[in-house]
Amino acid sequence: MPVGGLARMGKWAIGAIVALQRLSPAEQYFRWYHAQEVNASLFPKKSPGSPILNHVPRTDHPARNRYLTGVIGRTILDDRISLGAGISVADLRAIDGVDLLYDGSIRILQDGYSTDYRLGMMADLGRNSEVEFLWFQNHLDMIHDVYYPELSPITYQFWPGFPTDSNLKRNSDHTRTSGLHCGYSRPLRDDAWRIGGIVTINWKSHPKIPEYELQFLPAIPRDPGYSRAYNLGIGLSGAGRSSRFGIDFIFEPVWTDTWGVADQAMETRSGGVIQPGGKTVENFFTFLNAHLRLGLAIGDESGGLQFGLHIHSISYQLDQLDNSRERWRRQNESWIEWSPSLGAHLDIADFQVRYLGRLKLGTGIPKGWPEGAWWNPISLNGSLSISPSGPDFLVAPTGPYRFEKTLIATHQVALVIPFGR
């Protein structure tokens, strides 16, 4: 629930927003798997290889996040140049999707904060040409206290399906992001049509990455890492008496390198030794993503309709070097996500009603298990549910996956009441 305001006093402008968020944990349950030999020896009444499902909620209650944002700006040189600065801080007790990344856990407590700093400038170059610059820096520091059950055959003989004790594993998530953005736009032959372009550069450092416990993925330390991401885009827009049209294309190359660090001496396949602090697994990602957006608006200030389409192409190559097994492999994945949208707005007396509906097609959740697996995973709905939206989690897979198609629908209704008219 956000509450904010913006005020202008001569050449100065100032604003602030306060927001509270209540985030409920996903409906995910603790799962414990047995190998065929364990099932046959400890649970003779169960068929070999059959997993045991324990219905134990992961968290106790919804988490509450608090956000505060402040901005200040000023115009100079006869209002041809605008300067602005902003800062955002967040007290975080949960991040969407994290509770699904620790498979087998019974409880996850998150605690941390994020800070974001921004400096920007926009300049009028004359003849309706504009240029903008932005510098930003973001810090994310989170602690994940993950509780796992302590299980024993004796416990299950008397209290089947309920773990009586748990152990704690603490994970840290630290990310530093810095970036620069530049944009330029100008009219074509007349003011009805405009063309523009953007260039954005992001640098990310990951001093500490959590050791996620995903199905089918080994729990290896993923300590340091870094990423470099770029946006190169071009757009075209046009306006008529009662309609507006826009199209833009963005090419998004990303390079990410992460590696696992041994916390103790580890023997390699050939008999060598990886000393503490040495690299166990090295992951080299290369993303070549692209965005195509189309938009059409019909109407005027009293009311109208908006139609949109976002096509997101994701393609990446993973080169993975496993130093402990002395093995190298390459994996290529690609898919396309489609997001059509519909919007409407209507002015009624002194307020405005707005609606936005969006569908997301082409995305999916992992389903099934790697070919040749000797254990048989299961969940409540027969698939591993990973939130399709959320933070930029990056976990290296160990092999190709099958995906179950999903449909995501979003509806937003807003009531806008202006003050000071």
Image (cartoon, rainbow, N blue to C red):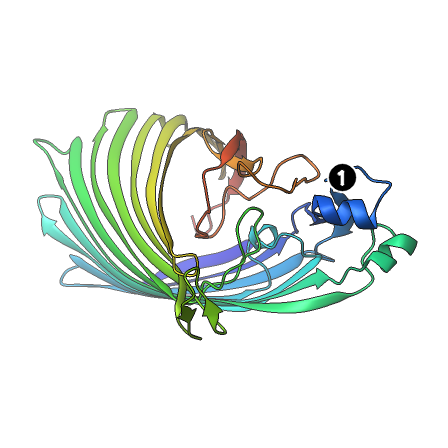
Q: Residue 245 lies in what quarter of the image?
A: top left
Estimate the x, y position of residue 269 in percent, counting from the top left.
Answer: 44, 59
Estimate the x, y position of residue 347 in percent, counting from the top left.
Answer: 46, 33
Residue, x 82% and y 50% (percent of image)? 42
Residue 248 drawn above or below residue 212:
above
Residue, x 28% and y 28% (percent of image)? 244
Q: Residue 85 lies in what quarter of the image?
A: bottom left
Residue 94 drawn above or below residue 371:
below
Left-right relation of 237 to 172 = left
Residue, x 49% and y 73% (percent of image)? 263
Does the rendering let one see residue 385? yes
Residue 47 drawn above or below residue 124:
above
Report the amino acid beneath label 1. Answer: Pro
Left-right relation of 332 to 162 = left
Q: Nearer the viewer, residue 211 or 197?
A: 211
Q: Residue 14 lies in what quarter of the image?
A: bottom left
Q: Nearer the viewer, residue 320 or 351?
A: 320
Q: How many marks?
A: 1
- Neighbour class for label 1 at 10 Å: few (<14), some, many (≥20)? some
Q: Secondary structure at mark 1?
A: loop
Name the residue that disc number 1 marks. Answer: 48
Estimate the x, y position of residue 421 in percent, counting from the top left.
Answer: 42, 48
Estimate the x, y position of residue 412 in percent, counting from the top left.
Answer: 53, 37
Q: Nearer the viewer, residue 299 or 202?
A: 202
Does the rendering let one see residue 10? no
Q: Nearer the viewer, residue 200 or 332?
A: 332
